[in-house]
Amino acid sequence: MPLTPGVRVPGLHRHFCRASVRDDKKLAPAKVRWKRATDDNPREFCPNPPMTFTTRFAPSPTGHLHVGHAFSAWTAFRAACEADGRFILRMEDIDTVRCKREYEQIILDDLIWLGLDWEEPVRRQSDHFDDYAAALERLRGLGVVYRCFKTRREIIDDIARAPHGTGEVYRGPLSPLDSDKEATHVAAGDPFAWRLSLDRCRDVLGERYDGMRFVEDGQGDQVADPDPLGDVILARKDVGTSYHIAVVHDDALQGISHVIRGEDLRAMTPLHVLLQTLLDLPTPIYRHHRLLLDENGERFAKRNKSVTLKSLREGGVTPDEVRSQFNR
């Protein structure tokens, strides 16, 4: 049976060849060779994979993809091709209110049109809330998370009263909430957030906390210092996880060796390294790429109503024309 890149073929996994995207000027789609999967050898769930270059693109189906998304997806795809590695697509849809299945299908159509291919099945995070709840429970067992019942206004007031000027970063309550008051809040059904206590993390990890490192591809060894982020939210009462827990869990589960993503997420890397350390998960190599800017010098973003790939392809723009913008 002839196999064509971009066509979904049940029962097959994609394996990307080294003789792929080499011409930076033409940015031609990769040639793909295909490898049949077996029921006893799935490729998606691989906590302890062989040393294979594996990366991913993980969009949130809250709207249509724009050119900035296309650049990020293509950058990761090309890297997998050039390394003769694996490219995985994941749907980060833990926001069950804003994420829509119709957007998910349009994302798939856009990526096929752009010239990408990936292994199947695609992991949909909304199908795996139990996995993330288990990770949160492990953090609770370590004593590094706490319920925060404070309102946004109360958080701002706490920050303003904190010593040494912490700016807009929340570093925990000025005085811990005693267990009786916490039980009263829980019994009343009050909303809360699970926050990660950096002070408790430091206590639990000891010298390992200050010794956390990660490798930024092309820049070498980097210090992973989560202190500038403060006590971040890892889950809420009504949403039992967050981007941070889900992405760290799934990158380890799927054997991601290289996280390739936009520069705007670089600041989150120390937090992710901290979670990997706490949960005994491997730390991948990171590569943060530049962000594409529009004609006004602003980054492409859904909130800016940037031109979507769907509108471009429906308007007759070719994938080559879109990809030509990536070298600007």
Image: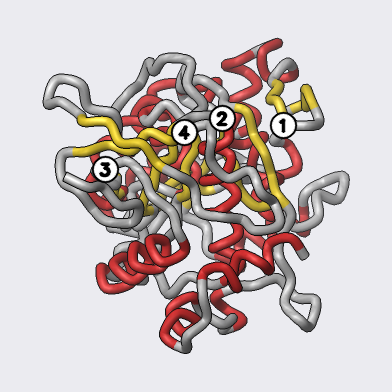
Q: Which mark is residue 217?
A: 1
Alpha carbon separation for disc pair 4 and 2: 8 Å
Q: Is residue 81 above or below residue 3?
A: above
The residue carrying mark 3 is 120
Residue 15 in the image, given as x and y percentages of width and height: 37, 33
Q: Which label lies toward us, 4 or 1?
A: 4
Quarter containing the C terminus:
bottom right
Circle nearer the N terminus (4, 2) = 4
Circle nearer the N terminus (3, 2) = 2
For this rendering, which residue is in front, 190 or 321?
A: 321
As shown in the figure, which amino acid type bears the numbered disc 3? Glu
As shown in the figure, which amino acid type bears the numbered disc 1? Asp
Task: Answer whether residue 146 is visible to the viewer in this image.
Answer: no
User: Toward which corner of the image does residue 217 lie, by quadrant?
Assistant: top right
The residue carrying mark 2 is 83
User: Toward which corner of the image does residue 43 lie, by quadrant?
Assistant: top left
Q: Is residue 307 above or below residue 222?
A: below
Q: Is residue 205 left or right of residue 73?
A: right
Residue farthest along the left direction in this orientation: 39
Do callouts 2 and 1 mark residues in contact (Cβ within 8 Å)?
no
